């Protein structure tokens, strides 16, 4: 397994976090896994919402994107692509995630997974990891690509633009 260089983005506020998600959205394709880590309130759901809303907007859709905190998974369609938004905070065992449809999500759509560390050995080797951190008044996103994501991240120029929107 190979990894990309770490990319660190400073995000001024919640709006910049959403803008980063909108910038990331068009790069995602069927089979992608994006792990979103960080403390409660660090911006994981805001980032996922930006990704999904941007994908829907490209298809002329505007469905509300809500947190899957209590439902554990929400599925959104944007054209022919499905976005599976998981929140694993309340999951206690790896096998519980399989029951939520993770295998199906990995085969049929894009998986945006909050608290991916709860997957343990089920964490896909080919993945983009984004760790969200609170920094004073803003946030920081630390990205690391594994497998094909190493090359896909490239130099990260598109991401730095998002940090300034």
Image (cartoon, rainbow, N blue to C red):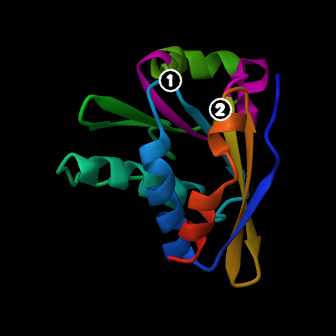
Q: How many marks?
A: 2
Image-quadrant location for residue 40? bottom right
Residue 142 in view (yes/no) = yes
The residue that appears at 48% across and 58% down in the rendered structure is 23
From the viewer's side, name the closer residue of 137 and 29. Answer: 29
The residue that appears at 44% across and 26% down in the rendered structure is 30
The residue that appears at 34% across and 47% down in the rendered structure is 55
The residue that appears at 38% across and 53% down in the rendered structure is 66
In the displayed structure, would residue 124 be above or below residue 78?
Answer: above
Q: Was residue 121 drawn as part of the magenta stretch in this picture?
A: yes
The N terminus lies in quadrant: top right
Q: Which residue is mark 1?
A: 31
Between the C-alphas of marks 2 and 1, the distance is 22 Å
55 to the left or right of 162: left
Q: Secondary structure at mark 2?
A: loop
Residue range corresponding to the magenta coloring: 107-126
Give x and y (percent) for residue 88: 62, 37
Q: Secondary structure at mark 1?
A: loop
53 to the left or right of 139: left
67 to the left or right of 82: right
Residue placed furthest toward the left: 60
> Crowding at label 2, few (<14), some or many (≥20) Cα neighbours within 10 Å?
some
Give x and y (percent) for residue 59: 21, 45
In the displayed structure, would residue 164 be above or below residue 124?
Answer: below
Q: Which residue is mark 2?
A: 91
The numbered dot on residue 72 is none
From the viewer's side, name the closer residue of 112 and 7. Answer: 7
Give the mark, 2 or 1, whose residue is nearer the N terminus. Answer: 1
């Amino acid at each position: 397994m190979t990894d990309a260089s770490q990319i660190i983005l400073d995000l001024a506020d919640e709006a910049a976090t959403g803008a980063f998600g909108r910038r990331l959205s068009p790069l995602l394709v069927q089979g992608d896994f994006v792990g979103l880590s960080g403390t409660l309130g660090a911006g994981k759901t805001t980032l996922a919402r930006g990704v999904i809303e941007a994908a829907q907007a490209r298809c002329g859709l505007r469905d509300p994107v809500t947190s899957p905190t209590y439902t554990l998974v929400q599925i959104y369609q944007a054209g022919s692509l499905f976005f599976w938004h998981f929140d694993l905070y309340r999951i206690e065992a790896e096998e519980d995630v399989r029951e939520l449809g993770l295998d199906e999500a990995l085969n049929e759509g894009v998986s945006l997974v909050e608290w991916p560390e709860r997957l343990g050995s089920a964490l896909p080797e080919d993945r983009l990891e984004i760790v969200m951190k609170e920094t004073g008044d803003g946030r920081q996103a630390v990205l690391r690509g594994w497998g094909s994501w190493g090359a896909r991240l490239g130099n990260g120029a598109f991401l730095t633009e998002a940090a300034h929107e």
